[in-house]
Amino acid sequence: MKNIWFFLFIFSFCIKVHSEDWLPNGMIVDKNGSIIHKVEMDKSFNSPKEELTTLAFVAEIEQGRSIVNLSKNSSFKVDSKYDENAPPPNDGSGFLVVQSFKVGIPSLPIDFLAESTGAIKLGGVMPTVVAPQIGIMLSVKAGMVGKLHVAKYKDIDNLPTYLSVPYDMKTLNKYQIGDSMTYEVGGGLGLMLGYGTNTYAQLKKIGIPIAVTSSMIGVGAIVEGEWICNVRKTGKTTVQARYIKKKIKKMSVFGGASLLLELGSFEASKLKGTGSGSFYEFDISKPEGLKAYQNFLRGNILYAFHRANNLKSKLVHGMKNGEEKRKMKNDVRPLMEYDSNFKGKEKRKFVSFPFLFGLQSKRGQHFVQTETKIPQSDTTIKTSLGVYRAERDSFGSLRKNYYRLFMFAGNHQRIFRKEGAKAIIQKRFSGNFKYFYHNGNLLEGELENEIMKMASSVGFKKELVNLKINQAAVNLRQYFEWKGYKIALEKKNNKKVLGTTKISADLMIGMTAIKELMSKALTGYGFEKNALQRLEKWFADKNNKRWEVCLTLLKGKEISLARMICKKRVLKQTKKGMNLAYKSLIKMQGSLGKNDFKDFSKNFARFGKGMIKNQFTFRGILDNIRKGDYHFIIQWSGERIPRGEFVLVPSKKFRFNGLKRIDR
């Protein structure tokens, strides 16, 4: 009896709120910054921040520059008299430039023994020496990325090579509202143990042995620390600043081979770490706001914390000429504070033909658990995020630099809010898929090629090959076109340059859809049926060529035996992907039953890994969603193409503005 009264007592002070359905926003990704999971807060949870941002992982700050034309689509008109070397057309909206700078020393082992102990010599003409190695692993890095607006194309070349963080009103006035910059400082030290081989050749005239090839395999452990700070101008006198502090412990198995210069390497790593972050807005036209901001930039957040606690920081909103104006009432406003723990596994491969061509690939699975507090709202959000990703970089004089990402994130959130003696609890989960392609110097004809690659990964070939994207001063030469695949009939060095070009695909899967998939997995009946039917239909259509799904050197040749081998390989891949997705969904259901949200998110990431195995697994999973809701959108932007989007599958319940959900 006492237990019953205790239960009723607790229940009277706790209300659980479950949404009928919920779709997340799309994930934000940029090669020159961070992968961010941005979640729009429920309307019942009022707070200074309308959106919650959870760090999925931070990409390394890279060198280079990317340019996005902010003009409307109507400005991009093909004109036979257009000078291809002229600046791209612009309707006065200007350009968004991401410019970055990086310095650093990679995590490479430094050998102390240098073959002085335990070395074994093999061979006589070109002797090979095998020796143990011991040394240190050193990592040092620093860099800055700025997102800046310029009015005219010619202004881009006048941007500074080194960006300075605005630290007072004088330097803040140099930037436009919306400009932002991120700076990163980090380093680490660790121990390396391993074995290496060196092969030597004798220079006959002087008799000096020269190492012409070398390779090494070993293990290493390193502890790294990172400090990442982002600053964004939000008004004439206001600036938002957020920082992330991370401590990472990393254990790696590595190996490499070189011919004077590095030819290739591999690394398999396990990592874990902790992070913390703070997010504030400052009015630096006021002395106390400026003092708090300058202390924040130096890593001292206590001044901002105490200042904000002594003030009731609010925004005053108003309308002028149809445009919303925002003004901070006080000089410091807290937005968000959070702590996180993360673990991950990653494999990295690197192949290089020095100065000509290089290729780097990464695959990994990460788990991030974050507790976020929204100041002045008594709201706390606990997020469990499982992430699977596969990345590829290409570079060198024979190949234009590009970056391609496949990513799936499974998210579970518990939102707590106090209302007097009551506590409101909301639980929700969702999935995000991201396909992202970035090329810093795209040539004409290559955009259509990338769209075909996207179709080979996610399906929807009919819709994607008919996708029309205006391109300034392009389509003036003759092309060979076949099923949307476009090849310029002139030499590669005569093709026009599109410059920076980005294209992405985003799938947002709602909570009801995930519940439906888990329910169907539990029954087990015909879960992979749709995927296999799509595969059979695809290979039965002779208009679909095997080079679209299988690697081949002769794209113009269709050989029956080769097509059969390709089908067998893709069938095996499809069954493997669907089986992984199926088993992961069952484990997800079990984890929910035990309230083990950490395990739920980890299995959610494994489900995503199975889902994005190929276009047949991708479409097969979507075919199993009948009652649930999802939203699938394609977006593009660039230097000589307009920003645009195409919704492949619209949400049945919600409206979206780009990647952001808008409630009806």
Image: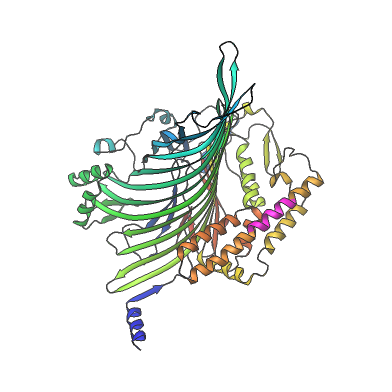
Query: Which quadrant would residue 172 be assigned to in this image?
Result: top left
Our reading of the magenta stretch's main secondary structure is: helix
| Quadrant of the frame with the N terminus | bottom left
Answer whether residue 49 is visible to the viewer in this image.
Answer: yes
- Image coordinates of residue 482 in percent, x first then y, are 72, 42
Query: Which quadrant would residue 140 be assigned to in this image?
Result: top left
Asked if residue 421 lies in the magenta stretch, the reply is no
Q: Which residue occupies the foreground of this view, 609 or 84?
A: 609
User: As displayed, is residue 8 above or below residue 605?
Assistant: below
Asked if residue 571 lies in the magenta stretch, the reply is yes
Answer whether residue 499 is visible to the viewer in this image.
Answer: no
Q: Residue furthest right?
A: 560
- Image coordinates of residue 88 in percent, x first then y, are 50, 33
User: As displayed, is residue 628 above or below residue 97?
Assistant: below
Q: Which residue is drawn at 68% across and 62% down?
A: 530
- Image coordinates of residue 619 in percent, x first then y, are 64, 58
- Image coordinates of residue 303 in percent, x first then y, are 21, 49
Left or right of residue 389, residue 537 in this image:
right
Numbered range of the magenta stretch: 567-577
Q: Which residue occupies the foreground of this view, 341 or 297?
A: 341
